[in-house]
Structure formats: structure tokens, C-alpha cells
Image (spheres, helix red, strand yellow):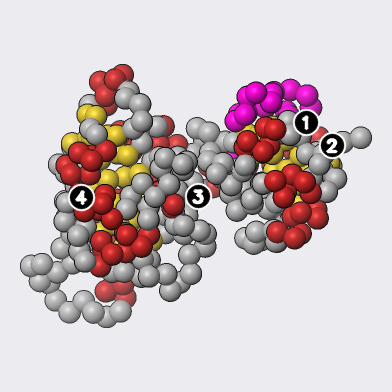
Amino acid sequence: MKPRVYVTRKMPASVLSRLCERLDVDIWDVEDEPVPRNVLLKSVAGVEGVLCLLTDRIDEEFLRSAPGVRVVANTAVGYDNIDVAACTRRGVMVTNTPGVLTETTADLAFGLLLATARRIPESEQVLLNGEWKTWSPMFLAGLDVHGATLGIAGLGRIGEAVARRARGFSMRLLYWDKVRKPSVEQSLGVKYRSFDDLLRESDFITVHLPLDAETRGLFGEREFGLMRPAAVLINTARGPIVQMKALYDALVARRIWAAGLDVYDADPVPPDDPVANLDNVVALPHIGSATIATRVKMASMAAENLIAGLSGATPPNLVNGEVG
């Protein structure tokens, strides 16, 4: 008998076909709508595995509802939606999809930096609204990216990929991370700074940190006060790393110049969100990894993690290795 699994969102046909070959699959297939919590808890009662997204909270309540679950395969690199410690205590394997979205997310981060610096979405709206009357010397003037100083908060895979892109714009590269990386410093020409010095020296700061107890709320009133008045904050990592009220206050008071955001305290952000509606903010709907190729690869990797774990093998991307 095939192991029973629950898939919390509609998957690409090739991935679903692969899952159905090896597993007994039940799926929430309502397009672009997260499975309601009550439906999720009811649906996982007899399953051995679940393939989930960041929108699905895997916690003690979930684990009590799914006493037979052996594998939780997250379709994401991050897994702050999962109580890994609770899963580990119950012997449940947790997996993720690292590496596959590095270059795609770096593309988006740098695109967001350019769009924010050069006021591209704002300029488009001016044209479409019929507000473009004539050429003017300071009309929609933005910031130069070439030659500017880029501060990278978190020099992991994505941070390194952003640094490689920035070299093409002759940017001065600084970084802060919990651990220094001398080999990367040498290969990419990026220089280490303390966190506060990174804030003081950078024209653009791009965030590529994981969300944990140390990074939650890392950017607040004090940190925005250290940044340059013409500085731009880019966040494509996790929303709660930035205190949104403090960011709003800094943007409104023009203590920093602008922000480009792909992540927020919670998804989805309502259309009347105060930060997203500021004229010096470019706000995107969490599309960091949203290319066709990358999303299919992520789903495929999550599926292979799930299949491996339920077949008795160690999943290739096991987060809590002590269980495997």
C-alpha cells in the first residue's frame, strides 16, 4: 500500500504525476488559495507525509492532528513556518529546498534595487495617469546605482549572488554576517563591516538573513537612525526582520530615501497597507523565486524529499539531521 500524503497547494502537473506514482496523494487544489486551517487539520489525520508551503503553519496543533506523519517537506528554503523542535521531538523529518532559488531571488533583489533607485514604478504611473507634461531637469530624479556602496546584510548564497551582480555596476561592496567569510571577501572583493558601520556607510542595504530569534526586528528605529538620509533598504528575505512601523516612520520623515520590499510581517499585504502605499516604496507580492523554471524545480525538490523520506531513505535536504 502506498503511503498517504497531503499536498497543501496545487502543484505542476509533472510534479503531481511523480508523487502519484509513489504515493497515495490527497491535494488541496483550489488555485492560489491557502488551505483553510480547519481543512488542513482534518485532512492530515491519517497521513504519513505532507508537502507544504510557507503559508502552512506546522506546529504542535498540526502534529497532534497528524500523529502518523513522518515527513514534512517544505517547498521553500526558509522554514520559519515549521516548529522544527516539535517535529524533532516526535521523530518527524523536516526538509526544505535550498540552492534552487538562489540566482532567481538575487535577480529579483537587484531588480528591486534598480526599480527603487530609479523610481521606475512611480514613473510608469505618472505616464499612465497623464501627468507627464514636459521634460524637466529634476523630474522623477532618482539615485545612481553605479559606483554606489552596497551593504549586504547576510552573505549567504543569495547575498553572494547579489554581490556578483553588483560588481557589474562597479559598486563598492560591504557585508555583515554572524560569521566572517574571508574566502568570499577575497573572491568577490567584498569587505566586512560591523552591523552599525554597514548601516552608516551604505547607500543601499539589501537583506538576505534567515529569520530567527536574533534577526527578528533587527531593523528598527535605532538602525534607521544610523542610515544615510539618501539610503535605500531592500528586503527580499523575511518581513519580520524589519520593524514595519519603524520603517514607515523613517520613510515618512525622509530619514531614509526609499525602500523596496518583497516580504512583510504577513502575507498577503492588504491594498491599503500604509508602507506599501508610500510614494518612496516599491512593494511586490512576495515573488522572489517566481520564475516558471525555479518554481517547478522547488516543487520537484520538495516532492523528491518527501518520496525519499517515506521510502526509508534519508531525504537529500533534511533540516533536522538528528531524526534522519
The vertical placement of 8 against 191, above or below, is below
In the picture, measured across the screen, residue 204 lies left or right of residue 100, that is: left
Labels 1 and 4: the sequence-earlier one: 4
Where does the image place residue 141, in percent across and percent down from the top left?
A: 15, 63
Q: How far separated are the C-alphas under marks 1 and 4?
A: 49 Å
In the picture, measured across the screen, residue 21 lies left or right of residue 161, that is: right
Q: Which mark, residue 3?
A: 2
- The quadrant holding residue 158 is top left
Q: Nearer the viewer, residue 119 or 318?
A: 318
Q: Nearer the viewer, residue 4 or 57?
A: 57
- Residue that sits furthest to the right in the current view: 1
| Amino acid type for the residue under numbered disc 2 | Pro
Labels 2 and 1: the sequence-earlier one: 2
Q: Which mark, residue 290?
A: 3
Of badges 2 and 3, the one in the foreground is 2
Image quarter in which the N terminus is found:
top right
From the image, tell me which residue sits under label 1: 310
Where does the image place residue 67, in percent across and percent down from the top left?
A: 81, 41
Task: Give the magenta-colored segment's residue range.
Answer: 296-324
The vertical placement of 313 against 134, above or below, is above
Labels 3 and 4: the sequence-earlier one: 4
Q: How far separated are the C-alphas under marks 3 and 4?
A: 30 Å
